[in-house]
Image (cartoon, rainbow, N blue to C red):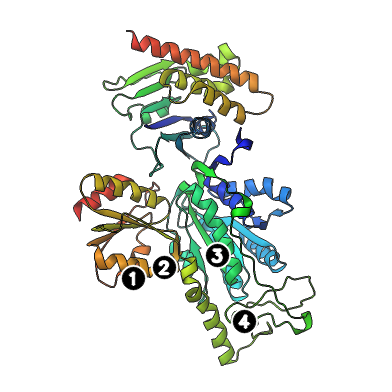
């Protein structure tokens, strides 16, 4: 296996933390080789933010993502910039709470889910949108095992927020699985 | 779960901090600057737990000065910075070199000159690392290519610094500093740790800069505050530590300091060779660019090109003998660098005209990609 994943959005959405958690799920808990890199502007909030993860069975030579298999976009700016950069056969996961103009791709699947709305209304806190997104990512792509992802999330989130984050993950996971099922049975 | 295993996902900067503490570093003084800040942040959290001291100083010059002072008292000491801060520290690095104070200076390279692009990677400080401070001076420069290598190589940095009483520059780049990879933390007992040589004479007989009391190159070093009183100066000095301008004494000091590098050369040179045995074209690379080089070499082999990689983890002293050996058998050496071409001149010098040397430069604040290197390998 060799998979490249790009998580993109706006500073403050927690995407760099999401990248770190995804990398820990794959590397520490599922036992793959893994590299996580990131790119961000000087702004703490509001600037473009991008985290990248490579998961492989073998030693990874080059740490930067060159042609992603899976892309998460959580802002219109990120969607415009990265929404079309995906390998043929890959998946673009779009948070349509924040993205109005969604790309139509011929060679890759586009899965739209209201990730931020789910965090806000179904989980109750918008701040956990990144964890909902991780759940949706695992549900829609099976990139890591749900067990590894849940362990990785619980090891990283602040004490006292475990139940909230567990809920965010399971709601996201379910939504992702449903989207996958819809996609596979047109 | 993480506490049950020695495998951790770590940032390069975190591995630098953890490795330094494992090497015995117990004093850090710094002034935060992107992209090195996580080193200071992490040390602020972990140093007090092992009885060490963390100080955030008022600026970069004060930081390196505090490091020199702490090292004189016997504490293995370190500072960490990036481009503009590294420029500020240069004068004191020369002081550490002439006063023979062991210390490690980490520079996580970002785009310069001046403020440049603070959040983006570069490799443009490799010449400054060797010659940033004025005067002939001994210095060793190490450069890791991965997070795991950062951990093990920073331990070597301290060992070299202690063994030879020299400043060691640890050159990382923004990508290595910020990326996360798995690191298997070695048991502390398994790490080779070197400590400075102490005098075995009585305090009243101590000549602080008498190399003959040691191995003829490195004088034994007493800790300040233990009764061995001595004078430390940036002026040229004799064996007593007091200033001298006598021609033979000045000559002897500069030549002795300089000779440390020749004597140390073999034990401080870390180079990895990948598929160079039968290679027709060899990529010479360091830092994050060596990772792109490794991928390019693998891809080139897949398309029938006999490519190899010479990965330099020691940049200074420059690994002449490795490059010369490659130059004798390879058709070309390709030197990708995230600068306008700095170490390529050293590769040319060490090649002695025996092969073609090709420079590949990139200065747009993005790392060099494997495909860029591959296309050069295909053209040669």
Where is residue B70 shown, x and y percent of the image? 70, 64
First in sequence, mark 1 or 2: give its number: 2
First in sequence, mark 2 or 3: give its number: 3
Judge the density around disc 4: few (<14), some (14-19), many (≥20) Cα neighbours within 10 Å.
some
- Are both tags, 2 and 3, on one chain? yes
Q: Nearer the viewer, mark 4 or mark 1?
A: 4
Report whether B374 appears left or right of B54: left
Disc 1 is attached to a residue of which chain? Answer: B
The residue carrying mark 2 is: B318
The residue carrying mark 4 is: B211
Where is residue B362 shown, x and y percent of the image? 34, 52
Where is residue A101 shown, x and y percent of the image? 37, 19
Structural distance between the alpha carbons of marks 3 and 1:
23 Å
Q: Are marks 4 and 3 in contact (CB under 8 Å)?
A: no
Q: Nearer the viewer, mark 4 or mark 3?
A: 4
Q: Are marks 4 and 1 in contact (CB under 8 Å)?
A: no
- Which residue is located at x 68 percent, y 63 percent? B66
The residue carrying mark 3 is: B168
Q: From the viewer's perspective, is residue B180 above or below residue A123?
A: below
- Which residue is located at x 60 percent, y 50 percent? B17
Structural distance between the alpha carbons of marks 4 and 2:
26 Å
Image quadrant containing the C terminus of chain B: bottom left
Disc 4 is attached to a residue of which chain? Answer: B
- Are both tags, 4 and 2, on one chain? yes
Judge the density around disc 3: few (<14), some (14-19), many (≥20) Cα neighbours within 10 Å.
many
Structural distance between the alpha carbons of marks 4 and 1:
31 Å
Q: Are marks 1 and 2 in contact (CB under 8 Å)?
A: yes
């Amino acid at each position: 296996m060799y998979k490249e994943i790009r998580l993109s959005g706006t500073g403050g959405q927690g995407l760099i933390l999401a990248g770190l958690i995804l990398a820990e799920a794959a590397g520490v808990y599922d036992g793959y080789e893994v590299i996580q890199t990131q790119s961000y502007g000087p702004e703490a909030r509001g600037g473009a933010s991008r985290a990248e993860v490579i998961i492989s069975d073998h030693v990874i030579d080059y740490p930067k993502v060159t042609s992603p298999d899976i892309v998460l976009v959580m802002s219109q700016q990120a969607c415009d910039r990265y929404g079309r950069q995906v390998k043929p056969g890959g998946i673009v996961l779009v948070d349509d709470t924040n993205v109005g103009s969604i790309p139509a791709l011929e060679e890759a699947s586009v899965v739209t889910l209201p990730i931020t709305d789910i965090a806000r209304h179904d989980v109750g806190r918008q701040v956990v949108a990144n964890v909902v997104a991780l759940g949706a990512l695992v549900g829609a792509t099976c990139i890591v095992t749900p067990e590894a992802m849940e362990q990785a999330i619980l090891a990283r989130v602040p004490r006292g927020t475990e139940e909230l984050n567990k809920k965010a993950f399971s709601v996201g996971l379910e939504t992702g699985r449903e989207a996958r099922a819809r996609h596979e049975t047109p | 779960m993480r506490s049950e295993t020695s495998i951790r996902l770590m940032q390069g900067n975190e591995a630098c901090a953890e490795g330094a503490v494992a090497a015995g570093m117990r004093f850090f003084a710094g002034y935060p600057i992107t992209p090195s800040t996580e080193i200071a942040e992490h040390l602020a959290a972990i140093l007090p737990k092992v009885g060490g001291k963390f100080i955030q100083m008022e600026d970069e010059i004060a930081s390196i000065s505090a490091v020199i002072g702490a090292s004189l008292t016997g504490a293995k000491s370190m500072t960490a910075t990036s481009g503009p801060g590294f420029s500020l520290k240069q004068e004191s690095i020369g002081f550490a070199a002439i006063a023979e104070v062991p210390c490690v200076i980490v520079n996580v390279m970002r785009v310069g000159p001046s403020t440049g692009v603070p959040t983006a990677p570069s490799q443009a400080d490799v010449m400054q690392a060797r010659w940033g401070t004025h005067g002939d001076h001994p210095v060793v420069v190490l450069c890791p290519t991965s997070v795991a290598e950062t951990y093990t190589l920073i331990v070597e940095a301290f060992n070299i610094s202690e063994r030879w009483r020299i400043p060691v520059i640890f050159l990382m780049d923004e990508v290595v500093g910020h990326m996360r990879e798995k690191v298997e933390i070695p048991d502390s007992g398994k790490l080779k740790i070197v400590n400075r040589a102490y005098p075995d004479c009585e305090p009243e007989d101590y000549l602080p800069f008498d190399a003959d009391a040691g191995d003829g190159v490195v004088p034994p070093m007493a800790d300040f505050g233990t009764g061995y009183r001595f004078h430390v100066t940036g002026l040229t000095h004799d064996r007593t530590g007091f200033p001298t301008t006598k021609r033979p004494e000045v000559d002897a000091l500069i030549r002795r300091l300089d000779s440390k590098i020749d004597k140390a050369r073999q034990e401080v040179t870390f180079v990895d060779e990948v598929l160079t045995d039968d290679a027709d074209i060899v990529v010479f690379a360091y830092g994050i660019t060596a990772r792109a080089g490794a991928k390019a070499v693998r891809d080139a082999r897949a398309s029938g090109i006999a490519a190899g990689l010479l990965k330099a983890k020691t940049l200074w002293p420059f690994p002449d003998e490795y490059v010369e050996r490659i130059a004798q058998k390879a058709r070309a050496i390709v030197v990708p660098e995230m600068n306008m071409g700095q170490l390529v001149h050293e590769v040319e010098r060490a090649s002695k005209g025996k092969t073609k040397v090709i420079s590949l430069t990139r200065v747009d604040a993005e790392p060099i990609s494997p495909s860029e290197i591959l296309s050069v390998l295909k053209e040669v």
